Amino acid sequence: MFERFYTYPPHGCEHPWILRNIKQKPIDCVHEIVDIGIYDLLKTEGHKHTEEKLNLWSKLNTDGWKVVPDCPDIKGEFNQHVGFDNVEYSQELLLKYFDPRDDSQLPVIQSNYEDLRSFKDYIKWFKCNYGEHNKIAIGSICKSDNNKKAIKMLKIARREFNNSWIHAFGLRFKQFIKARHLINSFDSTSWTFPRTQGHSCKNQEERIEYFYDYIKRINEVMTPYNQNQLKLVMCYGRR
């Protein structure tokens, strides 16, 4: 079922599937996902999206998908105090900005951090309002170190959106190994981290080395199950 790994590759590397935030420069690709960006929420007053950024999102045109604005559990994930519930805020944003008729929009399933009940409730609310949409993203597992809960959430998502394209934000590699049959795509920047004991990449040469190493690891997982994936991921290869 898995088809695409999205990321923002190092300068000088080509990759068919690009994930970028709304402030990053577009680069040539087969398909892109544009995210409004969540790390700004850690810095903004009140920890909510600014009107300026929401207006920028509304005006954004892409041949790929743009992620409908949402909000993670800032308290649960980042241990910062906020005066609102991220689920309620995400639902508010979805009701305001999501147009199911716009095929460029990618809605997100959110929840309180690592909370299965909250996750199930959000899916129920989403389906009551929009039905089984043809594509969704899962935001609840991003940064989650609880592999069992992350896999459980993806199993629930696949059961509830059986015929939908499911994109997993920030999936850990160990989670990907167990969830590749549940998702159609995922994104990660964890290729910048050390694969074994060592250090994170510190220069451009190491960024390129770590990037191709990560792609190789995906191929090693997928090749026995999907020979087409090898072609899809490596078709851009090294220059």
Image (cartoon, rainbow, N blue to C red):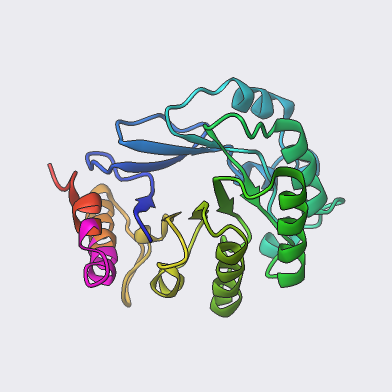
What is the quadrant of the N terminus in the image? bottom left
On screen, residue 178 above or below 9: below
Q: Residue at x 76, y 32 (%)?
A: 96
Q: Residue at x 61, y 68 (%)?
A: 156
On screen, residue 220 above or below 108: below
On screen, residue 150 above or below 186: below
Q: Position of residue 69 (x, y in %)?
A: 66, 39
Q: Residue at x 40, y 67 (%)?
A: 180
* Residue closest to the eye, 224 or 204: 224
Q: Position of residue 34 (x, y in %)?
A: 49, 37
Q: Main secondary structure of the magenta part?
A: helix
Q: Position of residue 176 (x, y in %)?
A: 42, 68
Magenta span includes 217: yes
Residue bounds of the magenta highlight: 216-228
In the picture as drawn, the residue positioned furthest to the left comes out as: 239
* Residue closest to the eye, 6 or 213: 6
* Residue closest to the eye, 12 or 33: 33
Position of residue 45 in the picture relative to residue 139 (left or right): right
* Residue closest to the eye, 38 or 69: 69
Magenta span includes 134: no
What is the quadrant of the C terminus in the image? top left
